[in-house]
Image (tube, grey):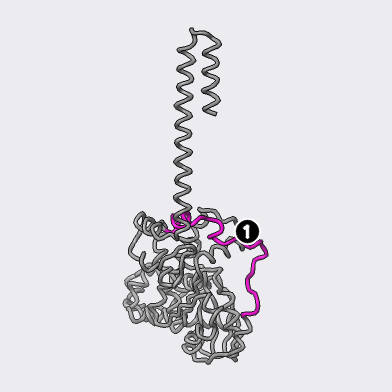
Amino acid sequence: MDIDRPIIIIGAGRSGSTLLVNIFDKHKDIYCCGETDFLVPRLWLELWESRLWTNDWSNLKVPRKERTEKKIHVDTRKDANILYTDTDRLMLKKRVGSGISKLMAENILEVKQSHKIWGFKEIWNGSSQFAYEWEPYDYVFPNAIWVHNVRHPFDYIRSLATNSNRRITYDFLNINLQSWVSMNKYSAKRSETGRYFLVRYEDILSDLKGTLLPVFEAAGVGYDPDCEAVLSLKYAQSRNKKQPKIEDIFSIRQIINCISVVKDLIPLMIKYNYSVPGLDMPLKDLEKDTGLGLEIKLRSHLPQHYMYEESQNLKLVLSSLLRRKLRRLIYGAINILEHKLANINNGLSARIIDLMRKFNA
């Protein structure tokens, strides 16, 4: 087994990562763990960023004897970058990375050596709660295979709300669409490694073999039909009541308002070949539009029945405004008449005012 070549599943949570873990683990040549709670960057922080553990200064630019004679004090936190040569520093980083990979695989996660490949998942990175750098992984697992798992943003939010037992409000939709964008953009940075695979949750369900075969081939293992048995099972399901679809909660107008203000949402949905429910147009036409321009273009492509509904709603609003304005005018006229007719026949003035009030009602 190549310890430094695991399959690492990344992306937003509630997107099918647990399903992916179980699919990989079902493969006869793959051993796949769950989440490690970002063990790699946390160990890297202790063993490299805060490296007070080293007493071997023999390869420094300033030899030990010279430092002793000149009474040069060395602070391992601050001075290592100055005293080490670039080559020595790189070699030490690789040595630390190799030590962490063996510690994780052999001692902490107890990866079975009988398998050719192993893996785990590091989801939620790039969100407001988790923002770990990817660089430590390049030293700990320099040949890792990165599997970026994505799911339609509306389905992701629906699953997230169900799992946390939260009601999907407009603010909840807006905030978590921004988070979805942030996490997926951050995960996409792993494409620079050249060992990156984008995997849509929807494609796993519809064509498991075609979707994951490139990953298996990159890992040096063939496709195992036993993996398909996993699809008949349910993983990471919430016990809470399932939330309704986004398009059943909000009007198409509200959805348009929301997606118009979330930066980079439309380009990502285009990249992942997702559409907006209820919107009758290809999203690729909107790639260069933002803000108000995007909202106007979205509205112009609403289906005909939505356009009719919006026009009817506008008529109702205008009619309501006119009625309220007219009532205010009549109410003002009544007050004026009451003052003017105060000295006229009380019976006649009271009758006139009473008729006007009935009309205004």
Q: Residues within 10 Å of mark 1 (few under 14, many from 20)?
A: some
What residue is pinned by disc 1? 165
Answer whether residue 236 is magenta in the image: yes
Q: Identify the residue at image location x=53%, y=60%.
A: 247
Q: Position of residue 79 (x, y in %)?
A: 36, 69
Please identify the quarter of the rendering in which residue 70 is found: bottom left
Please identify the quarter of the rendering in which residue 134 is found: bottom left
Residue 103 visible at all: no
Marker count (numbered): 1
At label 1, which amino acid type do we have?
A: Asn
The quadrant the C terminus occupies is top right
Q: Position of residue 203 (x, y in %)?
A: 51, 78
Q: Give the camera-side residue of 230 and 87.
A: 230
Q: Give the camera-side residue of 251 and 207.
A: 251
Q: Position of residue 69 (x, y in %)?
A: 33, 73
Answer whether residue 286 is magenta in the image: no
Magenta range is: 231-259
Q: Give the camera-side residue of 155 and 190.
A: 155
Residue 191 visible at all: yes
Q: Is residue 255 above or below residue 229?
A: above
Q: Is residue 98 above or below residue 122?
A: below
Please identify the quarter of the rendering in which residue 137 is found: bottom left
**Residue at the farthest right position:** 239
Q: Identify the residue at image location x=49%, y=64%.
A: 277
